[in-house]
Image (tube, rainbow, N blue to C red):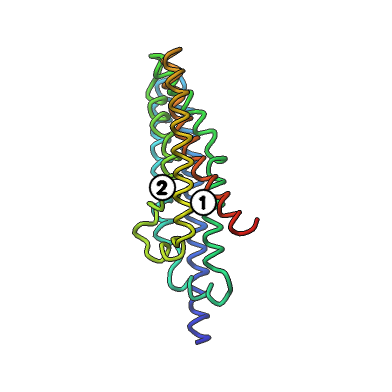
């Protein structure tokens, strides 16, 4: 039994190393994408072309990192190792809730750039870089909502067993209800903006999507903290 546990620990260490490299790939890809967006917004044709290529490569690296991360999630060795400790399920659920709270903070610059690009496009002054940025800005909101709904782990039975129970499902419903309320209020604001200045309404859409997804993630995190007595 101890030999099996040692093998499981070795496999788990290798999995963690792979995850760190995958996270590094995602970080580099995000940095490259930002650099590409800034270059694409320059007036020089050569710089704009290079920027668009870099932004596309960076986005591909981020997507690849996300896919590889899902394929290198907790496995049977992880569960075997962590079962030697107590509260593994609680720790996994807490880490996921914290990641939902942190993600909005790390994506503010992306939403700002998306809003700026949407303003330029709505004003008839957008270029290819603005279109790329406007298309990229909702991605973070979509990723966060997929985490809240559990869509990102739908094919991973091990993670579903760890992350989905009666309590977390109630968190999910409450978080989505909060997001719906924020979205409805936001649509009223965007409608009023559209009546005043249509360009402002278009520019506000990335922010509305971001605030809606953030409300869901933060509500889930708040409920998790409350359940943990934090």
Residue visible at 41% across and 57% down? 70
Q: Looking at the image, is mark 1 or mark 2 nearer the viewer?
A: 2
Give the residue pinned by disc 2.
146
In the displayed structure, would residue 177 be above or below residue 52?
below
Q: Is residue 7 above or below residue 66?
A: below
Tell me the quarter of the picture where residue 141 sits: top left
Q: In this view of the protein, which residue sits in the foreground, 179 or 54?
A: 179
Q: Residue at x 39, y 17 (%)?
A: 122
Q: Secondary structure at mark 2?
A: helix
Q: Residue lying at the far right in this picture: please name it.
A: 230
State the CA–CA distance, disc 1 to disc 2.
22 Å
Residue highlighted by disc 1? 24
- The picture places residue 113, in percent across and down from the top left corner, at 49, 28
Q: Earlier in the sequence, mark 1 or mark 2?
A: 1
Q: Using the image, tell me which numbered label, if any, was put on residue 227.
A: none
Residue toward you, 209 or 3: 209
Q: Position of residue 181 (x, y in %)?
A: 47, 36
Q: Position of residue 1 (x, y in %)?
A: 50, 87
Pick the residue in front: 6 or 78. Answer: 78
**Depicted 91 relative to depicted 192: above or below:** below
Q: Residues within 10 Å of mark 1 (few under 14, many from 20)?
A: some
Figure check: 4 above or below 201:
below
**Residue at the top extreme?**
196
Task: Please state, as top left, top right, bottom left or bottom right, where the C terminus lies in the image.
Answer: bottom right
Q: Identify the residue at image location x=43%, y=18%.
A: 120
Q: Residue 97 at what x, y percent from top left?
A: 53, 53
Classed neighbour count for the residue bearing mark 2: other residues with Cα under 10 Å, few (<14), some (14–19), many (≥20): some
In the displayed structure, does residue 153 sit left or right of residue 171?
Answer: left
Query: Secondary structure beneath disc 1?
Result: helix
Q: Is residue 47 left or right of residue 91?
A: left
């Amino acid at each position: 039994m101890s030999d099996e546990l040692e093998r499981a620990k070795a496999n788990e260490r290798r999995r963690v190393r792979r995850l760190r490299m995958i996270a590094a790939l995602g970080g580099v890809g995000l940095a490259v994408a930002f650099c590409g967006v800034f270059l694409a917004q320059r007036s020089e044709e050569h710089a704009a072309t290079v920027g668009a290529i870099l932004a596309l490569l960076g986005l591909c690296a981020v997507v690849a990192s996300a896919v590889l991360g899902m394929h290198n999630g907790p496995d049977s060795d992880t569960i075997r190792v962590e079962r030697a400790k107590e509260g593994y399920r609680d720790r996994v659920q807490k880490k996921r809730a914290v990641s939902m709270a942190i993600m909005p903070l790390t994506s503010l610059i992306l939403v700002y750039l998306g809003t700026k690009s949407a303003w330029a496009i709505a004003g008839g002054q957008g270029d290819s870089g603005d279109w790329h940025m406007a298309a990229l800005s909702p991605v973070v909101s979509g990723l966060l909502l997929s985490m809240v709904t559990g869509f990102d782990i739908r094919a991973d039975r091990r993670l579903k067993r760890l992350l989905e129970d009666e309590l977390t499902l109630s968190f999910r419903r409450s978080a989505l209800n909060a997001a719906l309320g924020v979205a409805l209020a936001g649509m009223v604001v965007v409608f009023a903006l559209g009546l005043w200045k249509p360009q402002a309404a278009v520019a506000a859409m990335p922010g509305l999507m971001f605030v809606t997804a953030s409300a869901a993630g933060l509500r889930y995190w708040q409920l998790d903290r409350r359940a943990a007595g934090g």
